[in-house]
């Protein structure tokens, strides 16, 4: 890196901070910027600054939003009485991509992980409980991830949501579409056997 001028070195260092980006890729990004027209470099830096200035959390569901209330919470065609709980805005985006869900979301902003200091108070659980009462919620779908932290969070939520008179569901786990049984790990096989469903009419 030392053979580059300091401004190029600084850019490479900044790109290398991105998740999954090593020095080699960071170097390629920097070279790309060097070759690009100056207006593209301005557009890139302005979009980064605009993101940092404008983006906030929706005051209802806590996803990323340009406004106080996000587009989904503001959409009158969405079912406010059905809340899907996810860990992050990226998880919400994944469910939205499926086009299946017509309810609204609640983004916890993480998952329980006592070793990392993430306890129930660190997540947006208090706000979730307020929404349940205020919006006359009829169903909660717990869609935290299927890993240790996600399952711990789901177990905690199931415990505290028991006292509410609503339908409480957990997303199913099992064989992915196009999945070939012989290549599926044993934990997934076990989960799909446990969550098997009746196929008789
Ligand atoms: Zn929202």
Image: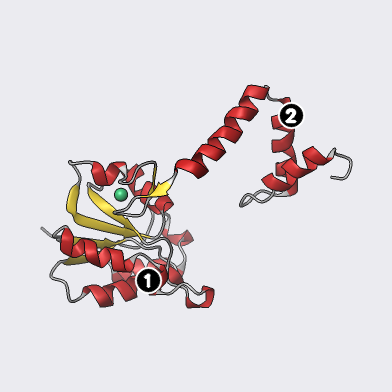
In terms of image quadrants, where is residue 40?
A: top right
Which image quarter is the N terminus in? top right
Residue at horizontal 48 percent and vertical 60 percent from the top = 183
Dot 1: element: helix
The mark that comes first in sequence, 2 or 1, is 2
Most distant residue in the right direction: 3
Q: In this rendering, would 158 be left or right of 3?
A: left
**Mark 2 sits on what residue?**
34
Q: Is residue 195 above or below residue 56?
A: below
Report the Cα–Cα distance between label 2 and label 1.
Answer: 45 Å
Residue 176 horizontal/vertical position (percent): 39, 54
Residue at horizontal 20 percent and vertical 45 percent from the top = 78
Q: Is residue 45 above or below residue 178?
A: above
Tell me if label 2 and label 1 are in contact, CB under 8 Å. no
**What is the number of the mark on residue 14?**
none
Q: How packed is label 2: few (under 14 Cα within 10 Å), some, or many (20 or more)? A: few
Q: Tell me if residue 166 can be seen.
A: yes
**Mark 1 sits on what residue?**
153
In this picture the colour scheme is secondary structure
């Amino acid at each position: 890196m030392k053979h580059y001028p300091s401004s190029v070195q600084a850019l490479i260092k900044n790109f290398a901070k991105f998740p999954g980006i090593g020095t080699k890729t960071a170097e390629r990004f920097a070279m790309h910027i060097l070759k690009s027209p100056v207006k593209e470099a301005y557009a890139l830096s302005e979009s980064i600054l605009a993101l940092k200035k404008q983006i906030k959390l929706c005051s209802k569901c806590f996803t990323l939003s340009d406004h106080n209330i996000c587009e989904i919470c503001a959409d009158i065609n969405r079912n406010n009485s059905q809340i899907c709980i996810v860990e992050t805005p990226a998880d919400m985006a994944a469910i939205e991509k499926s086009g299946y869900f017509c309810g609204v979301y609640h983004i916890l902003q993480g998952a329980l992980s006592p070793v990392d200091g993430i306890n129930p108070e660190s997540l947006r659980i208090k706000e979730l409980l307020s929404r349940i009462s205020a919006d006359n919620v009829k169903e909660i779908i717990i869609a935290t991830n299927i890993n240790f932290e996600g399952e711990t969070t789901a177990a905690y939520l199931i415990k505290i949501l028991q006292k509410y008179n609503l339908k409480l569901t957990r997303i199913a786990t099992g064989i992915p579409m196009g999945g070939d049984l012989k290549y599926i790990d044993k934990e997934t096989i076990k989960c799909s056997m446990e969550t098997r469903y009746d196929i008789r009419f």
